[in-house]
Structures are given as structure tokens and as C-alpha cells.
Amino acid sequence: HDEYMQVVKSARNLVAHIEREEGGHDYRFAEVESLDEELNKVRRQLDLVLERDPGEHPARAEARAALVAAETRLQQYLDNAYREENHE
């Protein structure tokens, strides 16, 4: 259960990081790469937990939902970065 909650925390921290960067209009390529790598770390973290816990723990759905929320938020950030870059 604790491992799932750590995934949730990591995903939420990523969303907060994205929001900070977006608030500062930081759409540099290096920042985009950094955020993408953070997302990949959260994905790997969840994959490891799922490998160790093949059962249907109630926190599993929450961890997956948090990852999806982070993926969605990063995509929004990337869309905004594209618009900013192309002055749309």
C-alpha cells in the first residue's frame, strides 16, 4: 500500500512541477526533456510496484489514476509549449 501511495505522491509532485514551470512560461527544450524524464520515472516506479504486487490492491487504481493525470497534464504543457513556440 505504501508503495502505491509513493507513486501517487511522485505523480502529484510532477503535476505541481509542471504547473510551476508553466506559471513561469518555461517551455525550454531542456525543461520539456526534464519533465518527460520525470514522467518516465513515475511510470517505471509504478511498473515495479505492479510487478511486486500482482493482486488488486485498492490503492492500485489511485496510483494508476495519478499517473494518467500526470500524463494528461504533461501533454497540456507540451501543447502550450508548442503554441508559445509558434506564437499561436
Image (cartoon, rainbow, N blue to C red):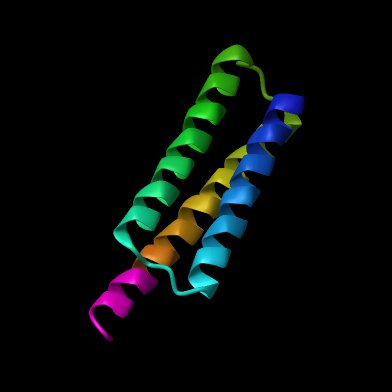
Q: Indicate the position of residue 38 as horizontal and vertical percent values.
A: 47, 42
Q: Is residue 84 magenta?
A: yes
Horizontal relation, residue 76 to residue 42: left or right:
left
Quarter of the image where the N terminus is located: top right
Q: Nearer the viewer, residue 58 or 66?
A: 66
Quarter of the image where the C terminus is located: bottom left
Q: Residue furthest bottom?
A: 88
Q: Indicate the position of residue 34 as horizontal and vertical percent values.
A: 41, 48
Q: Indicate the position of residue 61 as horizontal and vertical percent values.
A: 65, 38
Residue 1 in sight from this viewpoint: no
Answer above or below: position of 31 versus 51: below
Q: Nearer the viewer, residue 25 or 59?
A: 25
Answer above or below: position of 45 versus 14: above
Main SS, magenta residues: helix
**Residue in the picture at 57% in, 65% down:** 20
Answer above or below: position of 27 versus 29: below
Q: Indicate the position of residue 78 as horizontal and vertical percent values.
A: 36, 64
Q: Nearer the viewer, residue 31 or 84?
A: 31
Q: Is residue 39 magenta?
A: no
**Residue in the picture at 66% in, 18% down:** 55
- The segment highlighted magenta reads 80-87
**Residue in the picture at 67% in, 24% down:** 56
Residue 28 in sight from this viewpoint: yes
